[in-house]
Amino acid sequence: MPFLGQDWRSPGWSWIKTEDGWKRCEPWSQELERENNQCNISHSIILNSEDEEIFNNEEHEYASKKRKKDHFRNDTNTQCFYREKWIYVHKESTRERHGYCTLGEAFNRLDFSSAIQDTRRFNYVVRLLQLIAKSQLTSLSGVAQKNYFHILDKIVQKVLSDHQNPRLIKDLLQDLSSTLCILIRGVGKSVLVGNINIWICRLETVLSWQQQLQNLQMAKHVSGGLTLSDLPVHMLNNILYRLSDGWDIVTLGQVTPTLAVLSEDRRLWKKLCQYHFAEKQFCRHLILSEKGHIEWKLMYFALQKYYPTKEQYGDTLHFCRHCSILFWKDSGHPCTAADPDSCFTPVSPQHFIDLFKF
């Protein structure tokens, strides 16, 4: 029997029903074509000096075309996204439920694609993606990996359009590119879901995103209304005291000369250190000035290298200990407990990862 398809293991084409009958969907979208056109970054970052001698011009061109072809086959226009607000987290089979819930399944089914549009959940999702990039990327299934990079693409495009939170995304892409380089160079030492050419294309895409963010220019906001310079000093000081990230304080101090002076206040940095770190940690990393005073600003950034800081998010996932359900707090879930609120526990990004470790 003659073989007519591209791959006998493929599920076939996607079809949609119209008034004129059934029509076949296109296998890839314009977003992937745009992403593919940007994949022209030098391969010296990926290949070692020994590998570069193997590739001549003709072989390099052929390998590049093959990677793009595999990339198109892997990514399709139809993403496997769910719109569920909660999922049942079960780690073993029971009489009522068979199988178990994995990190990839939870990542697919929870509505992270819409969560990045919510300013309260944006930092939470970015931090979760960063933790997955550091240690859990290879544990995701093929579908979860596609959804991961699709959500990441939406995040990057959002930052490029509204110019908000570029530092967070730069840190995320830096960790992701480091992980991808290690996985690609050490191919065979770890299990990679998918073709190696697909992972190379993903690395090229991440490097392209990094270049776009590096070239991002913040447009000066021109408005005839009230600005930070018009606020009184005590209100500016109040704004600085409400920030929980030291880099945000440093960045805000670069806006006006008045904010620059307020951002160097020793009491401000002392309060920030006391909020994030314990007193025992202070004693191990004391930094004194020539006059014998404690340099709280320098101590904050020194302690940050050794100890994790407290994380604050506008909205997070919650876990119901009674129902073993993971859900967004705004949407809730069908809880059967007598006092549901007493069973709810906020789930930090690290706790989310730990829930699916067996």
Image (tube, rainbow, N blue to C red):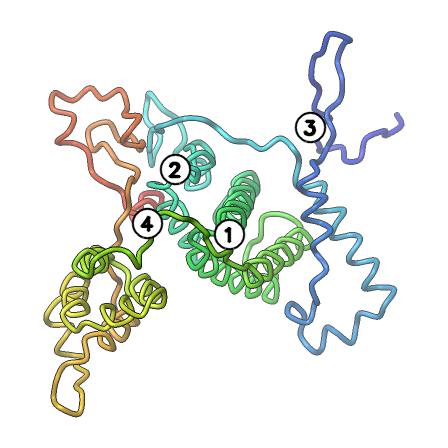
Mark number, residue 138: 1
Question: Residue reaching furthest top?
Answer: 19
Mark 3 or mark 2, which has the lower sequence index?
3
- How many other residues sit within 10 Å of disc 2, few (<14), some (14-19) or many (≥20)? few
- Which residue is rendered at x = 56% and y = 38% of the image? 143
Question: Residue reaching furthest front?
Answer: 224
Q: Give the spatial CA distance, label 3 vs label 2.
A: 35 Å
- Residue 153 on image: x %, y %: 56, 46
Residues under numbered marks 1 and 2 in contact, where contact means CB atoms less than 8 Å apart: no
Kindly identify which residue carries mark 2: 118
Which mark is nearer the camera, 3 or 2?
A: 2
Amino acid type, callout 3? Pro
Residues under numbered marks 2 and 4 in contact, where contact means CB atoms less than 8 Å apart: no
Asked if 246 appears above or below 338 in the picture, the reply is below
Amino acid type, callout 4? Leu
Kindly identify which residue carries mark 3: 11
Which one is in front, 280 or 242?
242
Which mark is nearer the camera, 1 or 2?
A: 2
